[in-house]
Amino acid sequence: MGSMKDLQIEIMGLTQDWHELIRRILSQGKVGAAYVMRPDEAPDDEERWNELRLVPDLAFTPAGESEPLAVEFKMYRWQSEWQRRLREAVAHMQEILAQGRYQRGIIILSFDVDDQTLAATRSRVAGAIDIWTLQHLRELAGEDKTLAEQLDELAGDTAMDTRSIAPRAETQVLAKGTAIAGILRATLAGTHGWQAFERTCADAVKFLFGRELHRSTSQKRSGEGLHRMDLICRIRSEGNSFWSMIASDFSTRYVVFDAKNYEAPVGQNEIELTKKYLFRGGLRTVAIILAREGASAQARIAAEQALREDQKLILVISMAELCAMLEGADAGDPPENVMFEKVDDMLMRMGR
């Protein structure tokens, strides 16, 4: 893509499609009236993010009522561990309601849940918050075939895992993504802040993907001592998840994370150096560069070439994108969504 803003818009596209379809379903005369509250573009700095943090995705006034409800939509491409994410979404909704602008809230899931699991989940949620599933949206769409067809099509485009997932025991989240994002933004760019940047990036990876990636090892040097890998993690490949898909599609068991605290976007040279960390014989074919200023056009071309010619996947995540993933995780938004869009975008626009 030509710019980071273009990429952010592309990543948000599917979520925006959901918001608009939900608005149309909820705005039927028999259902009520709804308005999308979120802007089309993602916040590009911390101040703007703080302004929008407690703005719900939609405001919905049911037919026959006068007070609007706060509506949050949660898009899960993989259903695994959704209840852990949902707990965070509920906590975020409670913050929204605590402002006093809305008395009740609805959290809408992008997939179906069996009745028993849904009932058990609702029983653990505060009375002012309800949980809706895809089936509830179908019922609201009613006999409108256009809405029903668009809903099924959008659900099909979203879901990467259609299996029913059994409830998991809840565990306490020991870290908060927003706090890590704040530390990350406070680090200095360039050589003065590289150690703090690398350390905080490692904390971010463990917070976001600690359940899917384990045995994280920091700063190992390659055999000849020339190249250092900031973090290497082993992928838990059991079950269906973004990371199990990566393990299968790219024949890898490990993923390398490399933090770059440069004041300018990383270029072709950084992609070439990172590519040296990867080799198929060691089941290590995937690397994620966490770059403060993202990737240059030359870096994106080099990454596409590495994938096309060497079957090595190298993704670049900017600090802004990483912070958005961290802050989104606190609101129950799966960070895998951003990663999946990155991979999907690269594969779809890659030439022969």
Image: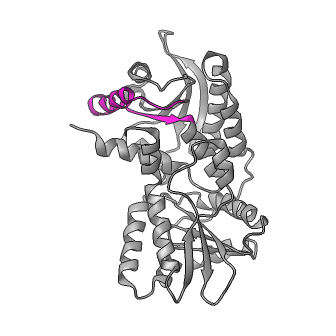
Q: Residue drawn 66% across and 86% down?
A: 65
- Let me know if residue 219 is in the magenta part: no
Q: Which of 139/59 is in front?
A: 59
Whether 307 is drawn above or below 12: the answer is above
Position above or below: 152 against 210: below
Residue 162 in view (yes/no):
no
Q: Position of residue 225 (x, y in %)?
A: 51, 9
Image quadrant where one finds the C terminus: top left
Question: Is 28 left, or right, of 171 in this rendering?
Answer: left
Expressed as whole percent of the image width and height from the top left, the position of residue 329 reads: 63, 51
Task: Answer with left or right where residue 280 lies relative to residue 113.
Answer: left
Question: In the displayed structure, would residue 293 be above or below residue 332?
Answer: above
- Residue 310 belongs to the span the image colors magenta: yes
> What residue span does the magenta drawing correspond to?
293-319
Q: How is the image coloured?
A: one colour
Q: Position of residue 192 (x, y in %)?
A: 66, 17
Query: Which quarter of the rendering shows the N terminus?
Result: top left
Q: Is residue 307 visible?
A: yes
**Residue at the spot 66% in from the left edge and 31% down from the top edge:** 200
Front residue of 146/155: it is 146
- Choose top left, top right, bottom left or bottom right for residue 85: bottom right
278 shown above or below 182: above
Q: Residue at position x 36%, y 45% from top?
A: 345
